[in-house]
Image: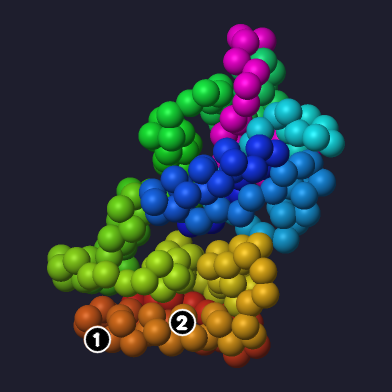
Amino acid sequence: MRLLIVEDNAELSRLLATGLLAAGYAADIVGNVAEARDALRSVTYAAMILDLGLPDGDGLTVLSELRRKMDPLPVLVLTARGGLQDRVSGLRSGADDYLAKPFALEELVARLEAILRRPGQLLGSSLNLANLVYDTESRQIFIDGAPHVFSSRETSVLEILLRRQGRVVPKKNVEDHIFGLSGEVASNAVEVYVSRLRKLLAEHNARIMIHTIRGVGYMMAEAK
């Protein structure tokens, strides 16, 4: 699951991304309002961690723009502004939660998981298809009740296809979910990870098919 961190403190951003990766989340980092807008236009994120005091403006501007477009992206506001009125202003602007600095990483992860579990958001406790169960918290995969270990990127492909099971997922969406803004991506990278995932699912007798919709993307469905 890919997150966007909007924070101008490079050291804090690095620590956040490292901690979130350990918790099972990949993260892209941007440091100002303009970069945040560009990232949100380019990638579909599961949630955003948003600082308010940015070099080129107020983070609430980004939040307000999202909500005016009726974008339900979960947003956790992370800021040094800890006063009551600041919290009220952030929540009224559309924040899902508000965490004042300094903070404990464990609390941030717990709050993030909480807003992602709310009705209408992306994160449920598990995703199921045929004889496979994917635990979204631990990122563990169970087939016929037995645990199996897939690589991080194969798991990411599995997750996005499971979340949209029975529907076609464009190749670009799969690529963004795996790599985000991480830089140059080989043209066949998505195909490679989908092929590896297919092989793993077959090896472990998962009753699941990944269909290639030529020129469009992929669809995951129960094998008939």
Q: Quadrant of the C terminus?
A: bottom left
x, y percent for residue 112:
47, 38
Counting from the top left corner in percent of width and height, residue 89 is at 69, 18
Q: Amino acid at mark 1?
A: Glu
Which residue does the image show at 45% across and 70% down from the upper left?
Answer: 153
- The image quarter containing residue 202 is bottom left
**Closer-to-camera residue (14/197):** 14
Using the image, tell me which numbered label, if any, was put on residue 203: 1
Q: Which mark is residue 28?
A: none
* Residue 114 shows up from this direction: no
Image-based side of 61 in relation to 4, left or right: right
216 above or below 7? below
At horizontal 80% and vertical 35% (from top left) the residue drawn is 55
Q: Position of residue 115 (x, y in %)?
A: 48, 36
Q: Is residue 137 magenta?
A: no
Q: Is residue 169 above or below residue 186?
A: above
**Is residue 188 shown above or below 110?**
below
Q: Which residues are magenta?
A: 63-85
Helix, strand, or loop for circle 1? helix
For the question of whether residue 63 can be seen, the reply is yes
Q: Residues within 10 Å of mark 1 (few under 14, many from 20)?
A: few
Residue occupied by mark 2? 194
Q: Residue furthest top?
A: 84
Name which residue lies at 76% across and 42% down: 32
Q: CA distance from mark 1 to mark 2?
A: 14 Å
- Tell whether label 2 touches label 1 (CB within 8 Å): no
